[in-house]
Image (cartoon, helix red, strand yellow):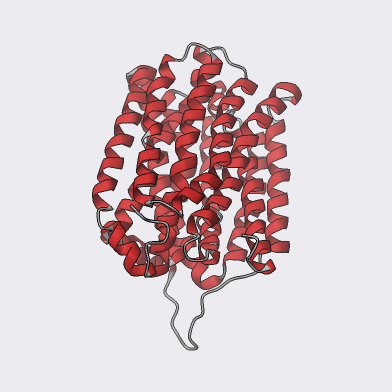
Amino acid sequence: MDDEPLDYRKSLMSLVMAMFSMAMGVGFIGPLLPVYAETLGASGTWIGAIFGANPFVRALLMLVFGSLSDYRGKKRIMAGGLLGYMVVSIGFVQASTVHHLFFLRAMQGVFSAMISPVARAYAGQLSPRAKEGAVMGMINTGFFAGFAAGPLVGGLLADVFGFHTPFYAMTILNAIAFTCVLAFVPEQKADIPAGAVRPSSLQMALQSVQLLRHELVRGMVLIRSSVGIGHGVFSSLLPLFGQLFLGATSAQVGLAVTSRGLVAALLQKKGGSLADRYNRKWLAISAALLAPIGFLLVPYSQAPYHLVLISMLIGTSFGLSVPSAEAIAVELGRVYDMGKIMGVKEMCRSFTIAIGALIGGMSLDVLGAVGAHAAAAALTGAGLFVALWHLREYRRFSVESTGSMGGNSE
């Protein structure tokens, strides 16, 4: 990226910085939330519902905010979401019932819907042709690096300074992200002809949903969503499994979650480079198939370090598959509408994470840990094979839309 204009590099790096700060703040509470809920008397089903409330609400609103950003401006929506995150972070400290946690997680979902698809759409518009993988890899490096650092630091803060400390730290880090967006990210709006009638939020959401009629869009969405459902099971049950079944501390659970994010972050640049050189469809799906292997191994862990190794395997899957899937989304966004494409992708992924969390909690109550993780692996694998079918015309689309094979050679 050294040959790109300075303003381009500054804008891109500002988005990376904001994604890192936001993700690290959220990562602080990931290993703690299921255990927090359990101490308040939550059942496995309730734990799944609490964990899934954020992605479920986020999914409901992503289309609106993703599409709205194409008309109203991306900077103000991202800044509003980060400000909301700061307020909710303080609310977690005051939570005293399971219902409070559920409400706060749902509100997190509202504000999250204002950040993730909008930041990715902004980065997609910045991406030069044939460098989509590299640019989205950089954005996801900030995202995964934040989640990598957050759980370990959050676990250590909870063990050393008290259970509520990570929530205060999350407030501070989201304040940093809010400041970065205001100071360094320029506003970016779509060019709207004078006198043109802007569609309503509902109309924009419906237009985004209609994109799923296109087979390639369904295939791209299925890659991310298939892994999302397994991720929902894995993320919601890992802290509970580690602490209750293996006797792990908060810091040890945080290390397991951190290892997944760290490996994924370290591989983003390589994954982006590969996505710009080789066929993105095959790279995304083949790498994603490593995740269900990891899900199956979780209930057979005998020590906390086993969870770390499994998390690293799943992180490898994310690190190599996500840049290719995101690059495909950018290609589709150029043809349709970047905000709508990113919104519908993130909506579907969030829905499946929420469904996975609920399935994980219910399966834990009924089938135990083995059954819950087997369901995650089966659903993920099946979804990826369906995605492969829907993307069978991707090579032709890529050639026609770019005029060359670019990074999608067989």
Residue in the foreground of this view, choosing between 377 and 352:
377
Residue 274 left/right relative to 40: left
Q: Nearer the viewer, residue 191 or 48?
A: 191
Q: What residue is at 29 percent from the left and 41 percent from the top? A: 383
Residue 125: image x %, image y %?
A: 52, 66
Q: Is residue 301 visible?
A: yes
Q: Is residue 16 or residue 285 the one in the foreground?
A: 285
Q: Is residue 7 above or below residue 364?
A: below
The answer, for residue 26, to whether it is visible in the render is no
Which residue does the image show at 45% across and 62% down from the upper left? Answer: 64
Q: Is residue 66 left or right of residue 380?
A: right
For residue 362, side relative to residue 382 (left or right): right
Q: Quadrant of the N terminus?
A: bottom right
**Snapshot quadrant of residue 95:** top right
Residue at the farthest right position = 161
Residue located farthest toward the bottom when viewing the structure as drawn: 195
Which residue is pictured at 69% across the width and 55% down the height? 178
Q: Viewer-proximal residue, 145 or 339?
A: 145
Count of numbered tags: 0
